[in-house]
């Protein structure tokens, strides 16, 4: 028999835009799910499924316990979840901003846009909140109160989304989470206990009144096997990750914004990083080990084969955060297209754009996040060879050899490295402009060379 109930209530705040697809394409190629009033919401199945997957992958928990708690559905066995809840709806003060973003597929390793692979999708902009509630019963056999409380504490820990290097990333919701979307955090959380040994608690639970508020205890231990680079970059030239305008009175393209603030998108940055990483791999990899090279790339970057529908898509381990940019200045620039044969201007090929430039206001700031562009790279369950590859990519960005964003052909998107914190195997290594501590990182580059077959040939 149930001895009592634990109910967790709180709010989920979007730290980055969210896309939970509805399966429709009425407004864009990928519309988000909305209720009858046109307001976005998060389905409970999406929330609880992502929560189970996140806890199983990032915490030292017993799989059979999580199957009982969150439910199980596969070809062998199926069982319901002992956790109950409802869909997550907007709080009263939240006013959602639904915008459209363009997406493209990058051909690796040349970094060019694949022909015919452009699409658009809806997102809910960051800053809004959804209310949520989890309810589960504890008993004397399968789930004691103490065990259920520790799992609830792990749920709260999963939703804290600490932005530093001290823990695993928090839970992400929806699609394109490796591109920085769906980052959330819990706010205003309360945990209530209804001990059915006392009749007033039974009555309070039946009337949906508040129970006895109890404290969160330490969660389960975290698996620390991610590789994390948290770098601050100084914008050397200009930057534009393009957003196109329909209004003819506005510039043809401006830098993309989220919640009316300029951002460095995870999708655009990840495309540049993946293209450069693939070039490095092609350079150092032993030609006789083509199959191993393809497997290495698919595990790290994922694979979506749009031409062969029989092949299952694979989600990669590389994750790039979407970051708000410092107060850079946007300036209008008019450009023309030149006929390569005659050297003259092509008729009708006049266009303008508004890239971002470093500003005195940004340079005078004291906090790193307000002065420099922040780039966060994470590789989940990272091998030493994969860590070495990401370090080589960081070196190219740090020295200005790898540009980010659009219009790279005319010098945009070039950065210089200022500082970086690199965490792997519970060790944190700090890099500054002078690039100290490189000897501590060389072993990971060596691991990449060995993995590529460099010991016997292509070193």
Image (spheres, rainbow, N blue to C red):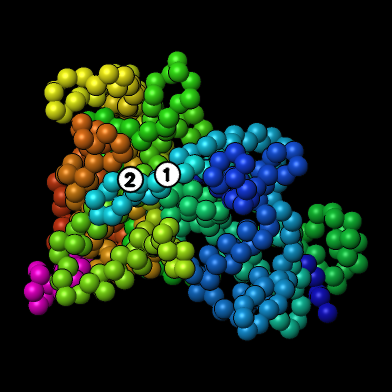
Which residue lies most toward the top here?
249
Image coords of residue 265 (percent x, y): 40, 42
- Name the image quarter holding the C terminus: bottom left
Q: Quadrant of residue 234?
A: top left
Residue 436 lies in the magenta-colored region: no
Residue 100 or 227: which is nearer the viewer? Answer: 100
Is 285 left, or right, of 69 in this rendering?
left
Q: Residues within 10 Å of mark 1 (few under 14, many from 20)?
A: few
Q: Residue at x 38, y 49 (%)?
A: 105
Q: Is residue 175 visible?
A: yes
The tag earlier along the polypeptide, 1 or 2, is 2
Q: Which labelled disc corresponds to residue 157? A: none
When the figure is inspected, residue 214 is found, relative to residue 183, above or below; the finding is below
Which residue lies most toward the front here?
341
Secondary element at image label 1: strand
Do tag 1 and tag 2 residues touch (Cβ < 8 Å)? Answer: yes
Q: Which residue is mark 1?
A: 118
Residue stretch rendered in magenta on the structure: 443-459
When the figure is inspected, residue 255 is found, relative to residue 321, above or below; the finding is above
């Amino acid at each position: 028999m149930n001895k009592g109930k634990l109910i967790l209530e709180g709010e989920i705040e979007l730290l980055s835009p969210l896309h939970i697809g509805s399966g429709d394409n009425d407004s864009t190629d990928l519309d988000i799910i909305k209720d009858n009033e046109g307001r976005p919401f998060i389905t409970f199945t999406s929330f609880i499924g992502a929560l189970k997957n996140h806890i199983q992958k990032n915490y030292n928990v017993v799989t059979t316990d999580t199957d009982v708690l969150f439910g199980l559905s596969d070809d062998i066995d199926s069982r319901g979840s002992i956790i109950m809840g409802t869909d997550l709806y907007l709080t009263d003060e939240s006013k959602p901003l639904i915008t459209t973003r363009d997406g493209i597929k990058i051909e690796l390793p040349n970094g060019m846009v694949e022909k015919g692979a452009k699409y658009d999708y809806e997102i809910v902009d960051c800053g809004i909140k959804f209310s949520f509630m989890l309810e589960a019963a504890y008993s004397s056999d399968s789930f004691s109160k103490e065990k259920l409380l520790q799992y609830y504490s792990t749920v709260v820990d999963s939703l804290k989304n600490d932005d530093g290097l001290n823990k695993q990333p928090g839970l992400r919701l929806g699609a394109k989470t490796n591109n920085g979307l769906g980052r959330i955090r819990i706010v205003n959380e309360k945990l209530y206990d209804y001990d059915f040994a006392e009749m007033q608690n039974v009555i309070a639970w039946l009337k949906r009144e508040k129970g006895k508020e109890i404290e969160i205890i330490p969660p389960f231990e975290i698996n620390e096997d991610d590789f994390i680079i948290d770098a601050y970059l100084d914008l050397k030239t200009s930057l534009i990750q393009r957003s196109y305008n329909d209004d003819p009175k506005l510039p043809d393209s401006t830098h993309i914004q989220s919640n009316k603030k300029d951002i460095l998108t995870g999708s655009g940055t990840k495309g540049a990083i993946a293209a450069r990483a693939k070039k490095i791999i092609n350079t150092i990899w032993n030609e006789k080990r083509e199959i191993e090279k393809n497997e290495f790339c698919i595990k790290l970057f994922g694979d979506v084969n749009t031409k062969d529908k029989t092949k299952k898509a694979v989600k990669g381990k590389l994750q790039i955060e979407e970051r708000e940019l410092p107060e850079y200045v946007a300036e209008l620039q008019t450009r023309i297209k030149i006929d390569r044969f005659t050297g003259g201007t092509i008729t009708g090929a006049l266009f303008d754009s508004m890239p971002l430039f470093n500003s005195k206001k940004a340079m005078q700031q004291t906090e790193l996040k307000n002065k420099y562009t922040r780039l966060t790279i994470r590789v989940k369950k990272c091998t030493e060879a994969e860590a070495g590859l990401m370090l080589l990519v960081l070196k190219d960005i740090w020295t200005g050899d790898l540009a980010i964003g659009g219009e790279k052909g005319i010098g945009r998107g070039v950065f210089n490295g200022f500082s970086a914190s690199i965490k792997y195997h519970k060790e944190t290594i700090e890099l500054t402009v002078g690039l100290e501590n490189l000897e501590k990182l060389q072993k990971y580059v060596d691991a990449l060379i060995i993995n590529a077959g460099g010991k016997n040939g292509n070193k």
